Image (spheres, rainbow, N blue to C red):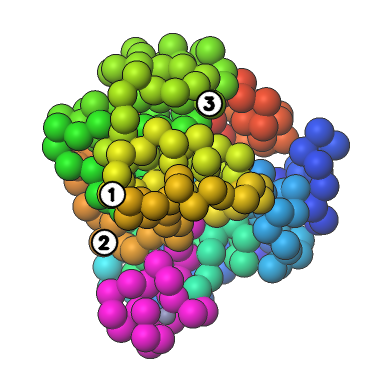
Amino acid sequence: MGSMKACLLRAPAPIETYPLEWTSVPDPAPGPGQLRVRVQACGVCRTDLHVVEGELPPRKSPVIPGHQVVGIVEKVGEGVTRARLGDRVGVAWLHRTCGACEYCRAGRENLCDTPTFTGWMVDGGYAEYVLAPDAFVYPIPEVFSNEQAAPLLCAGIIGFRALRLSGIQPGGRLGFYGFGAAAHVAIQVARHWGVEVCASTRDPRHQRLALELGARWAGGTLEEPPAKLDAAIIFAPAGEIVPAALRALKKGGTLALAGIHMTTIPPLDYRLLYHERVVRSVANNTRRDGVDFLRIASEIPVRTHVEVFPLREANRALNALKNDAIQGAAVLDCS
Ligand SMILES: [Zn+2]
Ligand SMILES: [Zn+2]
């Protein structure tokens, strides 16, 4: 059995201490129904930062993070029926669901009672190889390069689910709070649907990117948008934004919270919520979301802005993400 290079997390620690160790580990062997994927590119997500710094408590230790993998199927386990050797596939956050609980049976597998998540509960894509179940990988449309495609697999899919859950309609006005990887993809889908976007974000470079991508207005996080919003999405993990976003929302509007982790939401004056405003979180995604999103993304086609780092520099990429220094999405070159 050979070995592969990987970025290994032994124990959560602040990213400033460079906790990911560049090391060799045994090549993973695909079990029944599994594929071994040779990783070409892996996107860097804020959730990876939550895994590395321990906001998501360890579920496997040590662990290889990374859940936006684009790679080539290189080995297949017994019973694999969909993927073929040489296929280019995407491996995303939803590693596997049970298929049997009440949520899975109702087509809501994003809420599965016993899900497995890539790069947290099983090893992910900050490595030369990753394992994934045949039934949970996505074919990658040809129009995207490896680096372009990687951020679509979480930032893209989750942003798309957040758009859906916000209930925004064509011609409506939508607020984005935070303008990182997910928002820079979601704005392209929203514009494609004829939605007007107002982007609230603290970083002036992110405000500029939002305007370049067609936002009607960009301003500071707590600044009031020029007109009331039909719906809004908070991408930033900061609970203090919730009251400001509700204040900007029209009666009956929905505020979707797109992150897996958020700091405490301050006490809410009921008047902010009254008039049937809705606050809802966005949890994971179904495979249907992934398939629908990748189809729309290739039709538009979405252009991702990426900053590419060598795989061994994952610590540096995550530090840049934490410091708002990434325009669009960070991607690791794992080829
Ligand atoms: Zn389930
Ligand atoms: Zn993610």
Task: Mark 2: give few (<14), some (14-19) or many (20+) Cα within 10 Å.
Answer: few
In the image shown, does 79 or 276 lie closer to the viewer? 276
Q: Label 1 belongs to which residue? A: 252
Instruction: Name the amino acid, label 3.
Output: Thr
Label 1 within 8 A of ligand 2 by Cβ: no
Q: CA distance from mark 3 to mark 2?
A: 32 Å
Q: Which residue is mark 3?
A: 221
Mark 1 / mark 3, whichever is N-terminal: 3
Q: Identify residue type, mark 2.
A: Arg
Which residue is located at x 29 percent, y 56 percent?
289
Q: Is residue 181 left or right of residue 12?
A: left
Q: How far apart are labels 1 and 3 at the CA level?
A: 22 Å
Q: Nearer the viewer, residue 232 or 210?
A: 232
The kind of secondary structure element at disc 1 is strand
Mark in the foreground, 1 or 3 = 1
Lateral position of residue 269 relative to residue 91, left or right: right
Residue named by callout 2: 288
Q: Is residue 267 magenta?
A: no
Picture residue at 60% right of the left edge, 65% below the top: 122
- Residue reaching furthest to the right: 17
Residue 8 visible (yes or no): no
Instruction: Point out residue 274 in the picture as x, y percentages from the top left corner.
Output: 39, 52
Label number found at residue 303: none
| In this view, 2 is above or below 69 | below
| Magenta residues, start to end | 93-114
